[in-house]
Image (cartoon, rainbow, N blue to C red):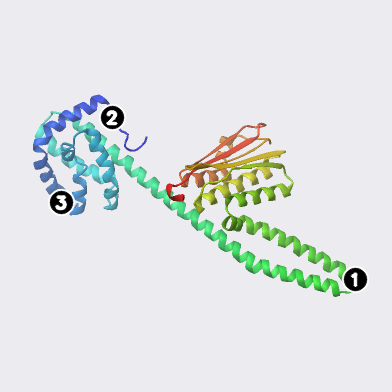
């Protein structure tokens, strides 16, 4: 249910609350002052009392509509959260105000009072949940960014330290091989070939950890590089269609690259496909990546329930952190398609 949408409040309830608020309006100021004293004795400090005033029924009596008041309640949620006022603390303040209302109105408007209190608490709980979800997404995005930076650091160290040492070792072995007598030449050649294999594998690992081509040449070149490596592995043929891309932030490029990388790895490991189709295009507002294959396929729901199936979950999480979505369409024997759609921030250009 989207914030700012109050369709859950029935028209009849809205009408009863409106009638009650009209009756409350003349006395709202005095009741608000009385509530101030009650909350002070309850241990609420001045800043907390000030913030709570905006979500009490007395404030509702000064609004033009119930929906307008509930929008103010939503807007007040960040300030309440910053002051340590969770919805349960607001509920305590509301119960104190209800005691004042019960004394003033006796049994009149009791259903409307209860409905308004429930509406305020529901709105606060919903707004607080949205705040927590946004904070979780922010922390997840920070963790992903830290992970990406750590990948780059490890990749650089492998390239600069281990990679250069292996290249030096290969050169020394080659020189020894040339100068060695015949009985030693063959073993040295085998050692040199082994080191060359290790260098090739190290380069593959470094490329997977830190896509330097993405930083140097951009997303299109990086995707083509991924496809070339996939083609060289000989697992399947790959056909590409890449349209000219709009200007994309680096974090968007990284997500597109990582999803393409994971999807192609999954095809190579599991799909037993003969053909893979990759398309990448963008508009002014979004970028779309689609990778499909004619392999064995799978049940996406069953795969998502597997405790050790992190690939799909990771791709989906990366997409959601940027406000996008990842769709997986597949069935046993019917191949698979992974579709990533990401919005392009307005400032990207």
* Residue displayed at 69% across by 70% down: 165
Distance of label 2 from label 1 (alpha carbons): 90 Å
Q: Nearer the viewer, residue 303 or 77?
A: 77
Report if residue 190 is visible in the image. Answer: yes
Quadrant containing the N terminus is top left
Query: N-terminal of the two: label 2 or label 1?
Result: 2
Residue that label 2 marks: 9
Query: N-terminal of the two: label 1 or label 3?
Result: 3
- Answer whether labels 2 and 1 touch (C-beta < 8 Å): no
Classify mark 3: helix, strand or loop: helix
Horizontal side of 313 relative to 4 (left or right) equals right
Classify mark 1: helix, strand or loop: helix
Q: Position of residue 177 (x, y in %)?
A: 84, 71
From the viewer's perspective, is residue 9 above or below residue 271?
A: above
Classify mark 2: helix, strand or loop: loop
Occupied quadrant, residue 59: top left
Distance of label 1 from label 3 (alpha carbons): 94 Å
* Residue displayed at 15% across by 30% down: 20
Using the image, tell me which numbered label, if any, was put on residue 183. Answer: 1
User: Which mark is nearer the camera, 1 or 3?
Assistant: 1
For label 1, the crowd category at 10 Å Cα-Cα, with few meaning under 14, some 14 to 19 and many 20 or more, is few
Q: Nearer the viewer, residue 266 or 38?
A: 266
Using the image, tell me which numbered label, if any, was put on residue 145. Answer: none
Residue that label 3 marks: 40
Q: Position of residue 26 (x, y in %)?
A: 8, 36
Distance of label 3 from label 2 (alpha carbons): 32 Å
């Amino acid at each position: 249910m989207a914030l700012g949408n109050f369709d859950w409040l029935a028209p009849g309830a809205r009408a009863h609350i409106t009638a009650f608020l009209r009756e409350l309006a003349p006395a709202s100021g005095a009741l608000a002052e009385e509530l101030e004293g009650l909350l002070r004795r309850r241990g609420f400090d001045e800043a907390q009392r000030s913030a709570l005033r905006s979500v009490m029924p007395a404030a509702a009596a000064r609004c033009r509509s119930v929906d307008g008041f509930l929008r103010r309640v939503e807007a007040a949620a960040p300030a309440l959260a910053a002051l340590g006022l969770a919805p349960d603390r607001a509920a305590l303040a509301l119960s104190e105000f209800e005691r004042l209302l019960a004394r003033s109105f006796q049994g009149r408007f009791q259903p409307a009072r209860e409905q308004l209190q429930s509406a305020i608490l529901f709105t606060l709980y919903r707004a607080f949940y949205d705040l927590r979800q946004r904070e979780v997404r922010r922390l997840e995005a920070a963790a992903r960014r830290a992970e990406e930076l750590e990948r780059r650091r490890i990749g650089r160290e492998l390239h600069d330290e281990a990679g250069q040492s292996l290249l030096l070792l290969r050169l020394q072995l080659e020189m020894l091989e040339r100068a060695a007598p015949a009985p030693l030449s063959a073993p040295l050649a085998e050692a040199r070939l082994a080191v060359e294999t290790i260098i090739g594998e190290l380069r593959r690992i470094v490329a997977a950890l830190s896509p330097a081509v993405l930083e140097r040449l951009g997303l299109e070149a990086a995707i083509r590089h991924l496809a070339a490596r996939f083609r060289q592995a000989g697992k399947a043929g790959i056909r590409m269609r890449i349209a000219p891309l709009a200007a994309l932030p680096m974090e968007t490029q990284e997500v597109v690259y990582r999803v393409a990388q994971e999807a192609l790895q999954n095809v190579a490991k599991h799909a037993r496909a003969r053909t893979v189709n990759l398309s990448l295009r963008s508009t002014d507002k979004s970028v779309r990546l689609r990778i499909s294959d004619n392999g064995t396929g799978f049940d996406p729901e069953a795969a998502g329930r597997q405790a050790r199936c992190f690939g799909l979950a990771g791709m989906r999480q990366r997409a959601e952190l940027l406000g996008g979505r990842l769709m997986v369409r597949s069935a046993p024997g019917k191949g698979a398609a992974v579709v990533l759609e990401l919005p392009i921030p307005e400032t990207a250009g």
